Image (tube, rainbow, N blue to C red):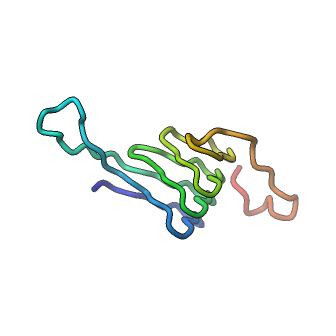
Amino acid sequence: MDQITLADRAIVSQDSTLCAGSHDISDADFQLITRPIVIGERAWVAAEVFVGPGVTVGRGAVLGARAVLFKNAIENGIYVGNPAKLVKERSWRQEATQHAPA
């Protein structure tokens, strides 16, 4: 429906939905509305997650299993639930920092 961008080393796990379209419920013709989705570098969208239209998942962010995200996820944020809520920031082990997002 619209562009979906997966950055380098982004992961989208099984049965997740990246939904780039919806409908204008105030329009009598129920017109289609589309907005692009971006999954940032080293971000992980875990199993059965729903990402809505126009959402950007920041670099290194993690969306826990079955999360439902309708707003942008900050860089290195860890989100869970429906609706998805930020629960903490992702930390990187020292040996992994040479490859981790800044």
Residue at the extreme left of the image, as rendered: 29
Name the spot of residue 30 as percent of width and height, x first.
Answer: 17, 40
In the displayed structure image, the side of residue 27 where residue 33 appears, left or right: right
In-front residue for pair 90/69: 69
Q: Residue at x 81, y 63 (%)?
A: 96
In the displayed structure image, the side of residue 65 where residue 53 appears, left or right: left
Name the spot of residue 59 as percent of width and height, x first.
Answer: 61, 51
Q: Residue at x 68, y 44 (%)?
A: 77
Name the spot of residue 91 as percent of width and height, x first.
Answer: 80, 50
In-front residue for pair 88/48: 48
Name the spot of residue 100 as percent of width and height, x first.
Answer: 73, 58
Toward which corner of the image does residue 75 lie, by quadrant? top right
In the displayed structure image, the side of residue 82 where residue 55 appears, left or right: left
Q: Is residue 25 above or below residue 90?
A: above
Q: Residue at x 75, y 41 (%)?
A: 88
Q: Is residue 65 above or below residue 68?
A: below
